[in-house]
Amino acid sequence: MKDTAGAGETFQNHAMVAAGVAVVGMALAAGLPQAPEHRWPALWGTGLAALTGVVSLALKRRAVRRSLPAALKVVGLVFALRAVTVGAGLYAMVSRGMGPWGFVVGFFGVYFVLQWVEISYVNAASKSAASGDE
């Protein structure tokens, strides 16, 4: 599949929604926790979720151009990437004497919304390809 106006617009729309989710998440992580020992882990969790979301959306865009099975393989790859990121992030927070809850809430709060955006993108791109809007 090639990326023409329809597919490119679909990706652009989903990327803008993902960016908005990341910005709102960062604002909430910066503003809600009262204590710095909770704020920093929340910011790190939110930032790492947003970063893995960018990587995920880009990989899924590339995979959807090939085939739906390729996109499903990317889902597994990105899941592993996020699992490693959560583990490393939690280790980094706890080893610095910060509580893990800010990180967990920040990461998964953004992750769940970005997961919906990514699934929506794959679904829309697949429908676009199936209908011949390549």
Image: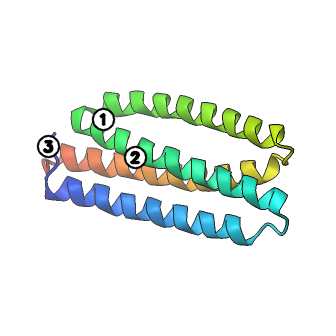
User: Residue 112: x and y, percent?
Assistant: 59, 51
Q: Is 114 left, or right, of 83 in this rendering?
A: left
Relative image position of residue 98 (x, y in whole percent): 84, 48
Q: Quadrant of residue 109?
A: bottom right
Q: Amino acid at mark 3?
A: Lys
Mark closest to the chain's N terminus, 2 or 1: 2
Amino acid type indicated by mark 1: Ala
Residue 63, numbered label: 1
Q: Earlier in the sequence, mark 3 or mark 1?
A: 3
Q: Nearer the viewer, residue 98 or 125?
A: 98
Label 3's element? loop
**Which of the pair 55/119 is nearer the observer?**
55
Dots 2 and 1: beta carbons under 8 Å? no
Q: Within the image, what quadrant is residue 90 found in?
A: top right
Disc 2 is placed on an element classified as helix
- Point 44% across, 42% down: residue: 56
Crowd class of label 3 (few under 14; some 14 to 19; many from 20; radius 10 Å): few
Q: Quadrant of residue 27?
A: bottom right
Instruction: Looking at the image, tell me whether mark 3 or mark 2 is earlier in sequence order.
Output: 3
Please tell me how crowded label 1 is: few (under 14), some (14-19), or many (20+) other residues with Cα within 10 Å: many
Residue that carries the numbered disc 2 in the rendered image: 57
Task: Compare residues 8 and 132 and report the one nearer the observer.
Answer: 8
Q: Secondary structure at mark 1?
A: helix
Residue under circle 3? 2
Structural crowding at the residue carrying mark 2, measured as other residues with C-alpha within 10 Å and reported as few (<14), some (14–19) or many (≥20):
many
